[in-house]
């Protein structure tokens, strides 16, 4: 794997330097210029490419003092061949809301990681963290020390609240119906303890999207998905609508006909929206951003339960609270979260996500448990099977 | 007096339908061109040959005495050459060659108390089941409720003024012989108490493993009662489906105080426009209130009226609700949304509102 | 319950003689004029109305010689009070395809039933049979004898093929894409043995609808649902379309906009159907029967598995064979049915409908079992979960 | 040399984002009016105040060396006042006050090998995971395939000529860290062999009840192996999900001959038009073929091309397939429909074609 000079001879990986898209192999090689760790990473990866299999062992538990998460332990199963990656742990560093940085902040992170690790990162991990990719056990604490001194902290791993993330929101998007970045930052900060010290049955993710476009995939990837929306009518600028029409947009075909509720009418001159029937899908607004905008009464819908397929199949989040005004969002959310976590803590099985727990005990029982009244917005449709568990002992339950 | 054994006739099957076909139908079989509606309950089918057959459809209580069947036979002789048929919703249809016979037939039917209608966007007859007239399993009566509801919807049978077809069905227990599960409006008899186990009978007539296996929720466990092997029901796990009773007579569910009706909406069978779909829960429980079940009648009439006022042309009940959304359905009908509406059976998760598509 | 004259005093039931809709109580009273059985039926029913409960006992096994089905045993739990309905069994008489009768045939049936039973019927039962409602055990055989002599036979009950039924089809409907009545009659006749002698794990129902309007509710109520359809283009008569438009039909709104695939265009003069995208839903044809008709290449789709909710929830039938030309329908159907019944016989559990069996073993295994290749028409969409059971032992399965 | 213990800093949370916001963003925070696209990868957001901020978005391999991050920092200093951000799909965005800086920045990015694009109806970056670079569980590599696919789709990143957004994601095992389950096109690493049990290790590091409970299909049973308590796997019941491996290192699933990729299509996340929905199986298995995975690249490019040619404006992949139907999708793409496409997991029945809506 290594030629006479100790340089990685990586014929297969070299193939991945070719082509127009930026190459991760080039990145590893760049890092290898200052980090011997990366030589061995290349070497082991080349073996994986040859043998078509991972050469990492199932992770062990490593971390920094007082934290139960934020580090993923990783060991090579070819430590003799590639001693520099015998340990190759990652640190998950909590990113700032919206993934905004100054050049200085980035350089600080680079300097720390060059000193203590491979110099390789993921910007960012799928949950949103800055991922410091690969270091040894005894570098963990020093890295952490420098990070916190620079104002950074670790993100989540294990059975904790995971690093919340959010879309760019009001920082640069005209559609944000609440301040996603403030909410994400506040929740992250409020639940520091839950982020760093595993006390849950399993992981719990928050994602904040400012509108139903859901640019942070909250509905698919977060146990609690906060999605901005509005309650009143779409703001409409008729002159701007006319301009779109004049500039060649086929409003009938590309806007009205694609409206999921067919609640728009275009008579060639005037666009009429039957707002009572609009489901706030964003399509018309997306197509005509200068002419249409979300209403003025802004806020968010809170949905619960998304997750990947293991164990009982993937879940999408579903509506828990149809609308909270923006001003009340954080209070409502915190009140809600504490009840949800209490319920989950009491009834959740080990490695059972909240969405799975709801499926297991039933949504109605879950609502009872957290003290929320059922509303029809929570369901796509009412049950179609007659297998109803009626409650109570008296003669008139269920009426 | 000993008689020589006659050969017993078996396995002959039903009479061949051809024997019963109107000559004009036989002639134009497979060669119909189009049809028109002349009036509610009166259709005219035109053949490629130019022939026209007129259908007059009359409502029927389905539970018919031979006297009434003979009346129909007489009317058929008089007006339709002796040819008639019944429909898949238990109406009776007279097949007329002579257009001039339509009105006299209608008059005679009216005089005998049989309304003509049920076509197109009228409400047709209610598909239903046995109830207390013949079934042990029933949580309610069938014919009685049907009579009351149809009395109230009589004008909807004789007029075609709804936005689209509206099919009502009734079944008196969860076996759903009325196949109510795909109806615009379904009336379903339900039990709400676990079976009361008759241990003595059980011991004699039921197989315990079969009884245990019959329960979809696993609520039945073996147990020793008075020193004998029997079963017990974990009450919290029972949702009163009655399947254990079906396999074992010693597990009756009848309970006058707790049996009653539920109302389901938005199902359909046809492939027209939207795909066939199940009815969804609208009202979880209405007590039995014979002989006229006013609460059930009001509930159904209310849903029909709200639908008639709000749906667009060619929108079946379910298609209308799809457009306006369930929250508005509950709002417009004034029906309360409860914990029972939220599914908790096997596909429950898929019925949750898994998008931010929201109306306020 | 009975007054001095032995006449039923039925105050509650009397209420049901009122109102415009034909009254079943009147029917019972009419029958009571000649049948004492009906007095007791009224009496017991009145008790049920008072007590809000059924007074029938769980049925016992009764029947006619050599048949395992066709009779539903029924006994009163108030036999002392109502001795005439102590036995009150029903006979299910197989109706002729399409429920067509001559007046004479009906009178024959009436005469037989008046002689041997209550004189009450259901025209018809939910499965389609002529239901003779209520007689004693020792009347069963004589009734049967007279029925068969008159050319009628019993229908199904128990774990048999149930009485098949069909829509009026080509007898009176311009849309029938195959001969539903012939198919129904042929299948009924071919499988006499399976209809009369229980040899299946549970019931098996056939329903034949001539087109996707499905006037016999096959897709919701039959284990095997045969639904007529066509393969080529909708037959279109432009002049007739124009007439509909002239007569005030809003073709854009009521036809085109309601087409589920939006494959129709109306420019105010000409209707254009993109037939490749048409799903044969029937809507446009239903609305304009003089202008549009099913295509010329007619046949049927075969769907499988519908049933009511007990045990694991209701099922709708799903596509098994997307299209069979009308000429080949019966042969294909019989070939298919024999394979399905073999598979069901071998793998079906007691009281397991075919639809439930397919759910349990998986559609792909079922297809294997009956020797049918999977085609995409069978699914609404392919699986969305990654839990795939790959087959075989070699390295290339699943490719 | 003994040093006095410094107070260890913990639980400070991430830096507050405000520190990192461009002054113009801070000023107009929450007061943006609309946006325009100036070119692929170049957006202009206009504030109520009239201020304009220009965003230049560049593609990134996500796996970045500190050298490249420093390059980005330098470019930010030069062109965007030192302000930049990353997107939820791992692209980097420079936030420019001066429109004149757009072109020079683009040129420098191009020179450094970072394409500008990914906006609107372009294909944006591929959300992905660790693969052989860092994860023990992976059935394939992540970064390598992403590189190859994006090389092939390069022009689709730099041009906005698709009918709608098209999101691709990759996950290297069924844990789906890449959250591929709701992507227009998902590439998913899969195992196809049951775990090989390392009984010695198992005995030492795993709890047998936990291992047994971890299996969604109940394929794991306790067993005695060489006289010691261990587990066995009923091979026919295993669908290679890897959950047992996650909870117990002694159950590895890696198998070079049988690991590989599957392709899924038609998922989406946004609520625009249609509701969010899962991706569905398109290709059950493609073998691992490093370093360039040509079969995977071709499969993805083929689907993208067929979609690009056939979909209507604003139709996401799933919306397009909904319109044309799955049979035509398989026909147009030439992908074979197999037994594996037919669902057999818990909601299987609901995925069958439960209507007579058929295209021929
Ligand atoms: C690093 C990261 C992938 C990446 O390359 O970006 C990742 C990596 C791992 N994930 Fe993940 N997950 C990562 C985001 C996700 C996401 C996406 C998200 O958060 O939006 C998901 C899907 C959403 C969800 O939570 O359902 C995800 C669903 C899983 C699961 C399945 C969880 C489930 O309930 O279905 C597992 C299995 C587990 O928890 O045991 C898992 C487990 C793992 C482990 C810890 C492997 C294991 O079994 O121990 C991986 C460590 C890899 C390594 O060696 O570094 N990872 N994981 C992501 C975290 C980086 C970050 O902090 O920013
Ligand atoms: C006579 C009958 C068939 C039979 O063999 O008995 C029949 C006959 C016709 N049906 Fe039907 N349908 C009959 C039960 C059904 C059923 C089954 C049911 O109700 O249980 C359905 C499915 C209902 C559902 O979807 O829940 C049914 C869905 C249709 C439709 C589709 C309507 C829709 O928009 O969904 C049409 C088309 C139409 O009416 O425009 C139709 C149209 C027709 C036409 C117009 C066909 C024709 O050209 O002759 C026939 C006259 C109908 C009318 O009532 O206006 N028929 N039709 C059945 C009469 C039942 C009754 O007495 O009311
Ligand atoms: C008479 C009839 C109702 C009616 O008033 O029309 C009827 C009556 C009974 N049905 Fe039914 N079913 C009748 C059509 C249906 C239908 C509708 C259909 O066939 O289109 C269904 C729903 C479709 C289906 O098959 O799924 C139906 C689904 C059931 C079930 C549930 C089966 C299931 O798999 O879910 C049961 C329970 C059972 O089989 O043990 C059942 C059981 C029964 C029993 C035998 C009660 C029992 O548990 O033993 C009822 C006898 C009542 C009596 O005393 O007369 N009946 N049953 C219908 C048969 C008349 C005929 O032959 O024409
Ligand atoms: C920067 C970013 C948010 C962030 O905080 O990082 C973002 C930003 C914008 N999104 Fe997004 N979206 C971003 C990820 C997403 C995601 C999440 C994902 O891809 O994982 C989605 C959901 C995708 C899905 O449905 O699978 C998403 C669905 C949308 C949509 C809905 C598109 C649709 O028709 O389904 C719009 C509206 C549009 O483009 O017309 C949108 C529109 C926008 C607008 C135009 C909003 C605005 O007015 O500023 C932004 C510029 C977008 C562009 O790329 O054309 N954004 N957007 C993300 C850029 C990712 C990238 O680098 O490519
Ligand atoms: S989710 Fe909405 S508010 Fe947030 S960036 Fe996307 S479009 Fe803007
Ligand atoms: S936001 Fe969506 S639902 Fe509302 S009017 Fe616009 S396109 Fe229609
Ligand atoms: S629905 Fe139930 S109670 Fe009614 S006839 Fe059928 S089995 Fe009997
Ligand atoms: S009624 Fe149904 S749920 Fe209750 S014990 Fe009997 S079989 Fe089980
Ligand atoms: S199913 Fe079709 S063919 Fe049969 S009667 Fe109904 S409309 Fe006519
Ligand atoms: S039959 Fe249905 S799908 Fe076909 S064109 Fe007519 S309305 Fe559209
Ligand atoms: S998807 Fe699987 S293999 Fe890939 S990083 Fe996540 S856990 Fe590891
Ligand atoms: S891989 Fe999954 S299905 Fe197979 S034994 Fe392990 S947990 Fe069970």
Image (cartoon, coloured by chain):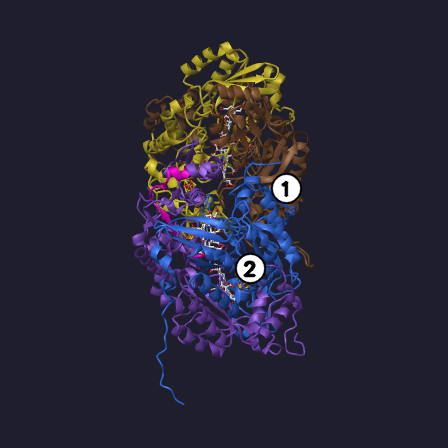
Chain colours: A purple, B yellow, C brown, D blue
Image quarter in which the N terminus of chain B is found: top right
In-image side of D132 versus A276 (left or right): right
Question: Is residue D110 or residue A314 the one in the foreground?
Answer: D110
Q: Which residue is mark 1?
A: C340
Task: Mark yes or no: residue D266 visible.
Answer: yes
In-image side of C59 versus D264 (left or right): left
In-image side of D264 versus B69 (left or right): right
Instruction: Look at discs 2 and 1 and give the one toward the viewer.
Output: 2
Q: Where's residue C348, x and y in %?
A: 59, 46
Q: Where's residue C324, x and y in %?
A: 65, 34
Subunit bearing disc 1: C
Q: Which residue is mark 2?
A: D110
Magenta region: A221-241
Residue C314 on the magenta segment? no
Residue D113 falls in which quadrant of the image?
bottom right
Distance from mark 2 CB to nearest ligand 4 atom below 8 Å: no
Q: Where's residue C216, x and y in %?
A: 53, 30
Residue A222 on the magenta segment? yes
* Residue at x 38%, y 23% (from the top left corner): B154
Label 2's element?
A: helix
Mark 1 nearby-residue class (10 Å; few <14, some 14–19, many ≥20) = some
């Amino acid at each position: 794997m290594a030629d006479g000079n100790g340089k990685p001879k990586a014929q297969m990986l070299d193939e991945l330097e070719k082509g127009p898209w930026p190459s991760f192999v080039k990145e590893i090689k760049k890092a290898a210029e200052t980090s011997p760790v990366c030589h061995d990473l290349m070497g082991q990866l080349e073996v994986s490419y040859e043998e078509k299999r991972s050469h990492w062992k199932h992770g062990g538990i490593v971390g920094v003092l007082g934290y139960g998460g934020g580090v993923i332990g990783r060991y090579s199963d070819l430590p003799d061949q590639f001693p520099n990656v015998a340990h190759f742990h990652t640190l998950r560093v909590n990113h700032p809301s919206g993934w905004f940085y100054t050049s200085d902040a980035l350089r600080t992170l680079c300097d720390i990681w060059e000193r203590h690790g491979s110099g390789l990162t993921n910007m960012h991990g799928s949950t949103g963290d800055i991922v410091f990719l690969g270091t040894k056990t005894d570098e963990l604490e020093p890295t952490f020390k420098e990070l916190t001194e620079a104002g950074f902290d670790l993100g989540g791993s294990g059975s904790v609240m995971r690093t919340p993330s959010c879309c760019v929101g009001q920082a640069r998007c005209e559609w944000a119906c609440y301040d996603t970045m403030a909410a994400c930052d506040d929740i992250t900060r409020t639940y520091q303890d839950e982020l760093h010290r595993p006390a849950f049955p399993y992981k719990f993710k928050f994602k904040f999207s400012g509108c139903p476009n859901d640019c942070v995939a909250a509905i698919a990837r977060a146990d609690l998905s906060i999605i901005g929306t509005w309650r009143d009518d779409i703001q409409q600028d008729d002159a701007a609508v006319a301009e779109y029409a004049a500039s060649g947009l086929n409003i009938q075909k590309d806007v009205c006909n694609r409206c999921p509720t067919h609640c728009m009418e275009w008579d060639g001159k005037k666009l009429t929206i039957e707002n009572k029937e609009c489901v706030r899908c964003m399509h018309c607004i997306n197509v005509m951003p200068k002419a249409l905008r979300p209403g003025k009464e802004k806020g968010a819908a809170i949905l619960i339960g998304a997750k990947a397929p293991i164990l009982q199949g993937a879940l999408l989040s579903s509506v828990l609270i149809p609308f909270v005004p923006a001003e009340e969002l954080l209070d409502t959310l915190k009140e809600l979260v504490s009840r949800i976590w209490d319920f989950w803590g009491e009834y959740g099985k080990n490695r059972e996500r909240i969405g799975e727990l709801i499926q297991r005990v039933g949504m109605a029982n879950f609502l009872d448990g957290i003290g929320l009244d059922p509303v029809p917005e929570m369901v796509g449709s009412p049950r179609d099977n007659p297998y109803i568990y009626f409650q109570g002992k008296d003669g008139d339950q269920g009426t | 007096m000993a008689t020589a054994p006659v050969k017993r006739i078996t396995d002959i099957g039903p009479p061949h339908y051809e024997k019963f076909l109107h000559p004009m139908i036989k002639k134009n079989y497979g060669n119909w061109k189009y049809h028109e509606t002349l009036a509610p309950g009166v259709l005219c089918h035109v053949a490629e040959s130019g022939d026209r057959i007129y259908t007059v459809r009359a409502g029927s209580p389905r539970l018919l005495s031979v006297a009434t069947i003979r009346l129909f036979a007489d009317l058929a002789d008089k007006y339709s050459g002796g040819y008639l048929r019944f429909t898949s919703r238990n109406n009776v249809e007279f097949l007329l060659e002579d257009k001039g016979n339509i009105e006299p037939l209608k008059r005679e039917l009216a005089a005998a108390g049989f309304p003509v209608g049920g076509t197109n966007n009228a409400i047709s007859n209610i598909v239903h089941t046995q109830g207390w007239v013949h079934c042990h399993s029933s949580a309610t009566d069938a014919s009685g409720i049907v009579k009351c509801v149809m009395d109230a919807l009589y004008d909807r049978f004789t007029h075609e003024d709804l936005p689209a077809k509206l099919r009502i069905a009734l079944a008196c227990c969860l076996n759903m012989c009325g196949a109510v599960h795909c109806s615009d409006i379904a009336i379903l008899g339900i039990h709400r108490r676990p079976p009361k186990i008759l241990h003595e009978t059980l011991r004699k007539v039921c197989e315990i493993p079969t009884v245990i296996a019959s329960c979809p929720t696993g609520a039945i466990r073996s147990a020793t009662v008075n020193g004998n092997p029997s079963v017990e029901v974990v009450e919290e796990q029972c949702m009163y489906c009655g399947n254990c009773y079906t396999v074992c007579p010693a597990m009756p569910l009848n309970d006058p105080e707790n049996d009653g009706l539920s109302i389901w909406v938005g199902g359909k069978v046809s492939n027209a426009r939207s795909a066939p779909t199940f009815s969804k829960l609208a009202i979880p429980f209405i007590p039995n209130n014979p002989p006229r079940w006013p609460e059930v009648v009001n509930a159904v009439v209310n849903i029909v009226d709200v639908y008639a006022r709000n749906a667009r042309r060619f929108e079946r009940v379910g298609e209308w609700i799809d457009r306006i959304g369930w929250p508005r359905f509950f709002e417009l009908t004034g029906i309360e949304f409860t914990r029972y509406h939220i599914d908790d059976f096997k596909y429950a998760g898929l019925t949750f509102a898994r998008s931010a598509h929201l109306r306020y």
